[in-house]
Amino acid sequence: MKLRSLSAGLLGVLVALAGPGHLPLGGLPVMVGKANADESGKESARQGGTAGRAPSVPMARDPSAAVAEEYESARRKGTREAFELFIARHADDPLAEQARAELKQLAR
């Protein structure tokens, strides 16, 4: 009698640990089901559907726009240090010539 109750108790613990989310009755494990759903979404997107997910990485900014914003920031500050920093970071950019001209005017 003790052996039967012990085995029933162990079976109950195993079922509780497995839980309903891990292996549904008569189905695939949950992660396999999710992977299959992802694959079917990719397939419909390849076939022209709109059921795809949004990209997780934002679009990259235009580098020239970022340089122009940094130059404008240096102009707003109007300090020698701001222009020197801009020139050090973007020495090959055409705006660096304008920054050098602004720097010369500050020296006067």
Image (tube, helix red, strand yellow):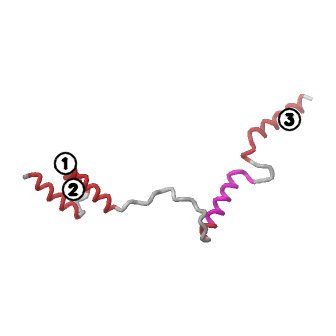
Spatial distance from mark 1 to mark 2, Cα to Cα? 10 Å
The three-letter amino acid code for the residue at tag 3 is Ala
Q: Quadrant of the N terminus?
A: top right
* Mark earlier in primary sequence (1, 3): 3
Per the image, label 2 sits on a secondary structure element best described as: helix
The three-letter amino acid code for the residue at tag 1 is Glu
Q: Are marks 1 and 2 in contact (CB under 8 Å)?
A: no
Within 10 Å of disc 1 (Cα), the crowding (few <14, some 14-19, many 20+) is few
At a point 28% along the width and 59% down the height, the residue shown is: 68
Q: Which mark is drawn over residue 8?
A: 3
- The overriding secondary structure of the stretch rendered in magenta is helix
Q: How many marks?
A: 3
Quarter assignment of residue 65: bottom left
Asked if the stretch drawn in magenta spans residue 66, the answer is no
Q: Which residues are magenta?
A: 28-42
Within 10 Å of disc 2 (Cα), the crowding (few <14, some 14-19, many 20+) is many
Image: 1 above or below 53: above
Spatial distance from mark 3 to mark 2, Cα to Cα? 77 Å
Position in image of residue 29 (x %, y %) = 72, 51
The three-letter amino acid code for the residue at tag 2 is Ile
Q: Which mark is drawn over residue 81?
A: 1
Residue identified by numbered label 2 = 87
Spatial distance from mark 1 to mark 3, Cα to Cα? 78 Å
Q: Is residue 55 left or right of residue 8?
A: left
Q: Depth check: 87 or 8 in front?
A: 87
At a point 22% along the width and 61% down the height, the residue shown is: 95
Quarter assignment of residue 52: bottom right
Within 10 Å of disc 3 (Cα), the crowding (few <14, some 14-19, many 20+) is few
Q: Residue reaching furthest top?
A: 2
* Mark earlier in primary sequence (1, 2): 1
At a point 72% along the width and 46% down the height, the residue shown is: 22
